[in-house]
C-alpha cells in the first residue's frame, strides 16, 4: 500500500497513467467493433449478454496477462524463421488474429453484398450460436489483449498503473458496447464501414506480425476520416428525408 501511495506522488506516474488509459481505450475500439458486429448476429435476447461476457473475458484475460508479465515479455523473443523473417510467439499470434479478422470481415461483407444466397447469416438472424460467438470473441480478445499488454509494458514498468488503465478502458468499453451495437444495427452503411475497419485492422496485425511497423496513428486517422465522411453522408440522407416528408 505504501508503494502505491509513493508511486501516486510522482508526477510522471500520473502522466503514464493518463497516456496508458487513452491508449487502452483507443485499442479497445478494435475489439469493441468486432464484439458489436458479431453479437448483432445473435437473437435479440442474447446480444447484450454476449457483449457483457465478451468484454468481461477481455478484462479477465488482460488482468491475467498482467500477472504473468515476465512470461509475456518472453513472447517477443524469436522462435522460428519463415522466409527470412524471425517470428516470435507474439508475431505468430498477431498474424493468426489478423488472418482471422480478414477472413471474418470478408465473409461478412460478402453476406451483405449478396444476401440472397446467405439469408440464414444476415444480421439479425441467428446465423451463429451463442457459444460460437463467445469462442470467436475470446479468440480476438486474446490477440488484442497480448498486443495491448506488450505495448503497455513498453511504456511503464509499474504494474499498478497498467491494472488501473486496463480496468478504466474495459469499463468504457462496457458502457459504450450497447449504444455502439444499437447504432451499427440501425445503420446498414455503418455495418459495411465497420467491417472495412476490421479488414484494415486485420491487415495491420498481419503486417505487424511480419515486422512491418504501421504507425497506429495513421490507421486511426484513416478510420476517423472515413467515419466523418459517413457521418456527413448520413446527415445529408436525413436532410433529404426530412425535406421529402415536409413536401407531402
Image: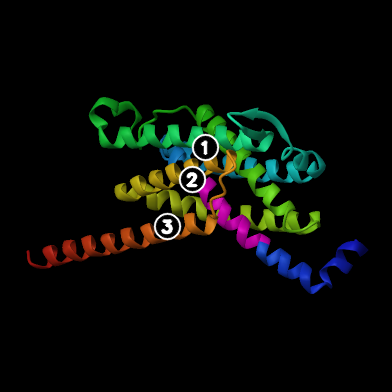
Q: Which residue lies under the disc numbered 3?
A: 222
Where 113 sits versus 200, above or below? above
Q: Quadrant of residue 161?
A: bottom right
Q: Residues within 10 Å of mark 2 (few under 14, many from 20)?
A: many
Q: Is residue 5 magenta?
A: no
Residue drawn where x is 89% and y is 68% of the image: 6
State the SS at label 1.
helix
Q: Is residue 24 magenta?
A: yes
Position of the C terminus, as image quadrant, is bottom left
151 and 42: which one is in front? 151
Report how far apart the C-alphas of labels 2 and 3 lie in the structure. 11 Å
Q: Are marks 2 and 1 in contact (CB under 8 Å)?
A: yes
Where 158 sits versus 143, above or below? below
Sequence-wise, which precedes: disc 2 or disc 1?
Answer: 1
**Looking at the image, can residue 49 be seen?**
no
Residue interval drawn in magenta? 20-32
Is most of the magenta stretch helix, strand or loop? helix
Report how far apart the C-alphas of labels 1 and 3 lie in the structure. 18 Å
State the SS at label 2.
helix
Left or right of residue 181: residue 67: right
On the image, the x and y values in percent for residue 83 come to 58, 29
Q: Which residue lies under the disc numbered 1?
A: 98
Amino acid at each position: 500500500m505504501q508503494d502505491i501511495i509513493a508511486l501516486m506522488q510522482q508526477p510522471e506516474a500520473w502522466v503514464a497513467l493518463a497516456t496508458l488509459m487513452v491508449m487502452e481505450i483507443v485499442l479497445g475500439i478494435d475489439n469493441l467493433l468486432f464484439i458489436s458486429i458479431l453479437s448483432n448476429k445473435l437473437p435479440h435476447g442474447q446480444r447484450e449478454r454476449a457483449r457483457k461476457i465478451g468484454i468481461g473475458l477481455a478484462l479477465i484475460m488482460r488482468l491475467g496477462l498482467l500477472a504473468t508479465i515476465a512470461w509475456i515479455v518472453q513472447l517477443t523473443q524469436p522462435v522460428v524463421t519463415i522466409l527470412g523473417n524471425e517470428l516470435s510467439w507474439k508475431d505468430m499470434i498477431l498474424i493468426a488474429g489478423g488472418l482471422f479478422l480478414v477472413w471474418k470481415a470478408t465473409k461478412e461483407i460478402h453476406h451483405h453484398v449478396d444476401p440472397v444466397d446467405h439469408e440464414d447469416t444476415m444480421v439479425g438472424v441467428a446465423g451463429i450460436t451463442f457459444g460460437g460467438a463467445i469462442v470467436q470473441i475470446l479468440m480476438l480478445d486474446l490477440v488484442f489483449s497480448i498486443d495491448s499488454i506488450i505495448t503497455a509494458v513498453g511504456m511503464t514498468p509499474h504494474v499498478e498503473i497498467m491494472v488501473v488503465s486496463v480496468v478504466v478502458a474495459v469499463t468504457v468499453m462496457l458502457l459504450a458496447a450497447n449504444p455502439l451495437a444499437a447504432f451499427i444495427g440501425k445503420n446498414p452503411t455503418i455495418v459495411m464501414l465497420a467491417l472495412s475497419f476490421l479488414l484494415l485492422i486485420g491487415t495491420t496485425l498481419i503486417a505487424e506480425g511480419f515486422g512491418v511497423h504501421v504507425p497506429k496513428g495513421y490507421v486511426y486517422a484513416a478510420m476517423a476520416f472515413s467515419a466523418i465522411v459517413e457521418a456527413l453522408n448520413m446527415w445529408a440522407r436525413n436532410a433529404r428525408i426530412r425535406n421529402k416528408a415536409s413536401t407531402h
